[in-house]
Image (spheres, rainbow, N blue to C red):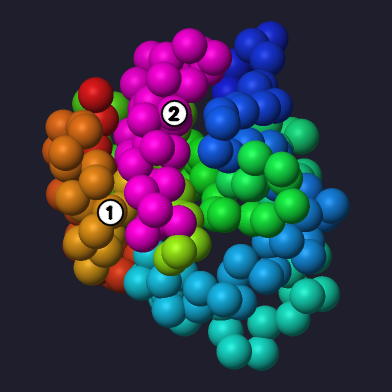
Amino acid sequence: MSFYPEPSPVPELLKTAVFTLRPLTPAHVQLDYAALMSNIELLRLWGGHNWPTADFTLADNLQDLAWHDREHRKRIAFTYSVLSAAEDQCLGCVYINPLTKVLPGNETVLADVPSQTPIVRFWVIQSQIDNKLDSQLLESLIAWFKMEWDFSLVLYHTRKANEQQIHLLGDRLRHLYTLQLPNRGGTNFCYGT
């Protein structure tokens, strides 16, 4: 089922002087895989689980990217690759999912939030965190959602263990919810404007 309203167009591009967002497709498999496998510990902290595993292969990644591409085309969820300005390096990813997919079973905690509200999660490679790309990405995402998307509310999600991202989101957005999600690494936070 689609969570983004028809006939609203799904934005296909966000371009800045520093990075470009494009829908993540199988065409990005090499760039995405290089970013994943060189940032394993960062991704495990970000995701709250043991992914990517040490034996995660390029073929596994191709399968994941095909799945993300199908979801994007069916408007079920949207995943964007954060690419360098030249589009020759993957710098991270942005995930846009309906609330019910990311936080299943928390309907009572978030009873005041429509079930099709998007939850945005993102990561950038460690070297780009050091260069403050995550801050630039967040600022761009906030503006992009206001100007290009047809959502009345957008939530940004992170885990308690990811202190750096908590500070980033907390400096720019308002903390709205604290959730206990054992399947997502314990305590999680949602922020919004």
Q: Quadrant of residue 4?
A: top right
- Residue 82 place in picture, x, y as percent: 59, 46
The tally of labels here is: 2
Q: Is residue 118 visible?
A: yes
Q: Earlier in the sequence, mark 1 or mark 2?
A: 2
**Residue 114 appears in the rendering:** no
Q: Residues within 10 Å of mark 1 (few under 14, many from 20)?
A: many
Residue under pointer 2: 140
Q: Residues within 10 Å of mark 2 (few under 14, many from 20)?
A: some
Q: Residue at x 48, y 11 (%)?
A: 147
Relative height, residue 63 to residue 96 (above, below): below
Residue 142 in picture, x, y percent from top left? 38, 26
Q: Mark 1 sits on what residue?
A: 165
Q: Name the one closer to the observer, 75 or 111.
A: 75
Residue at 84% from the left image edge and 52% from the top image edge: 27
Query: Main SS type for the magenta part?
Result: helix
Residue extent of the magenta highlight = 128-156
> Looking at the image, which residue is at 24% across and 42% down?
169
